[in-house]
Structure formats: structure tokens, C-alpha cells
Amino acid sequence: GVRRQIEYYFSDRNMRHDWFFQEKIASEPEQGWLELRWILTCPRIRDVHKASAEDVLEALGPSLLIVKQAGGTHWIRRGHPLPALHDPGPLVGDEPVWYKELHDSNIAGGSVNQCKQVSPSLATAAGARPVEEQLASVCDAAAGEIAASKPGPDSEPCCAVCCRKRPRDDFSKAQLTKHRRNPTCKDCVASSNAAGPG
């Protein structure tokens, strides 16, 4: 569950609309990488899975996402470039309340997990709904998209990396059996192996 959720966060489908993660990935000191602490603030990771940093790192062991340790923390990235952002983020000073609270708690040295954060794309679309309603909507939407991507016995599987439906011949036998809930097509496996770590 945790690995699948994080892989969804890094998917093209999510990254096209997630200005918050795109902003963090473009930031210094590790440009191109997302710091683990930002994943731990996501309501589905924090409140539904109740995952710690250790749980996330363990879950990402078999993933195609790349994990490294630098500057006393862990960083995560995709093996291929980010898609263009379809929904621009707010202008500086016009950020949603959750964004300001999240950054204020980090500056003040507070725990990131004490903040109530909602999905950036939902926060801009949800308007002034209560945070609890927004969190429920985030969880329901993510669960629905994940469930919709699961292949049926007669359907074409969807690659977990490129998020495209592919003929069964485009997957190795191991990907369709051992990793049947999260198969990766041969092209994405090959490009990930060619890119290597780092």
C-alpha cells in the first residue's frame, strides 16, 4: 500500500497537477529530488498508512523510484524526467493556508507531522471546505485512481511507471505474476536500468 501510494505521487498522472511536489523537487539543496519529509506530510501516508520514515524506505526497496541519503536525510526521485505542470501553483504570497502552516512549522522547528496538509491540487479546487472534508476527498480520489489502474484478468495491464495500458507481451512473466498489482513494462525497466542510480 505505501509503495503503491508513493509511486502514484511520482506518476505522470499526479505530477502534471501537483505543483507542491514539483516545487519541492525543483528546489535546492538536492534539485531533482524530493525530500522524504514532504512525503511523510501527505495525509494518506501519515493518517491512513501511519507510515514512518523507516516504513517508507522499506516499502520503496523493490520500487523503481531512486532513493539516496544526503545531508542527513533521505531523498527520492523518478528514473525519468518530470512531466510539464498543467496546473500552475499559486503566486508567492497567495499560497493556501495549509502551505503556510506547513512551512511555518518547519521554520519554527516544529514537527512536520503536526501540520494538517491536504493535496495541493485539491486545496486550490476545494475552496474553503473544512480540512477534514478535504482529507477525505484526497484519500477517496487517490484510492479510486489506484483501483482503476489495477488490471482485470482479461484487460491490458497498466505500467506503474509510465501509466500506459500495454499489451501483456510488453511485460515480463515475472512482472505479471510476482508484481501483478504493480507491473512495470519492459521499456520502463530497461530505461531505469540504463539510467542507473544517481
Image (cartoon, rainbow, N blue to C red):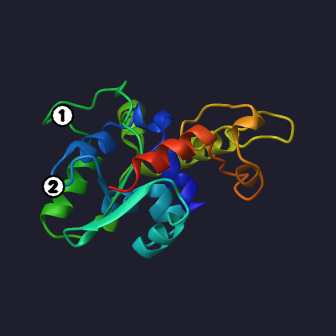
Q: Give the structural element (helix, strand or loop) at label 1.
A: loop
Q: Position of residue 33 (x, y in %)?
A: 29, 51
Q: Quick one: label 1, few (<14), some, or many (20+) residues within 10 Å? A: few
163 up-or-down from 9: above or below: above
Q: Is residue 135 visible?
A: no
State the residue lying farthest toward the right.
Answer: 154
Which quarter of the rendered picture does the N terminus lie within? Answer: bottom right
- Which residue is drawn at the image coordinates 38% and 56% (left, top)? 197
Residue 9 as seen in the image, left or right of residue 48: left
Q: Position of residue 116 (x, y in %)?
A: 35, 57
Q: Position of residue 62 (x, y in %)?
A: 55, 63
- Which residue is drawn at the image coordinates 25% and 47% (left, top)? 24
Residue 32 as seen in the image, left or right of residue 8: left
Tell which of 136 and 109 is nearer to you: 109
Q: Amino acid at mark 2?
A: Pro
Which quarter of the rendered picture does the C terminus lie within? Answer: bottom left
First along the sequence among labels 2 and 1: 2
Q: Give the structural element (helix, strand or loop) at label 2.
A: loop
Q: Amino acid at mark 1?
A: Asp
Q: Which mark is residue 29?
A: 2
- Which residue is drawn at the image coordinates 61% and 31% (left, top)? 164
The answer to whether the residue labelled 2 contacts the one labelled 1, judged by CB atoms less than 8 Å apart, is no
Q: Position of residue 196 (x, y in %)?
A: 40, 53
- Which residue is drawn at the image coordinates 23% and 31% (left, top)? 90
State the residue lying farthest toward the front.
Answer: 194
Q: Is residue 52 visible?
A: yes
Q: Quick one: label 2, few (<14), some, or many (20+) residues within 10 Å? A: few
Q: Quadrant of residue 66?
A: bottom left
Residue under numbered circle 1: 94
Q: CA distance from mark 2 to mark 1?
A: 24 Å
130 up-or-down from 107: above or below: above
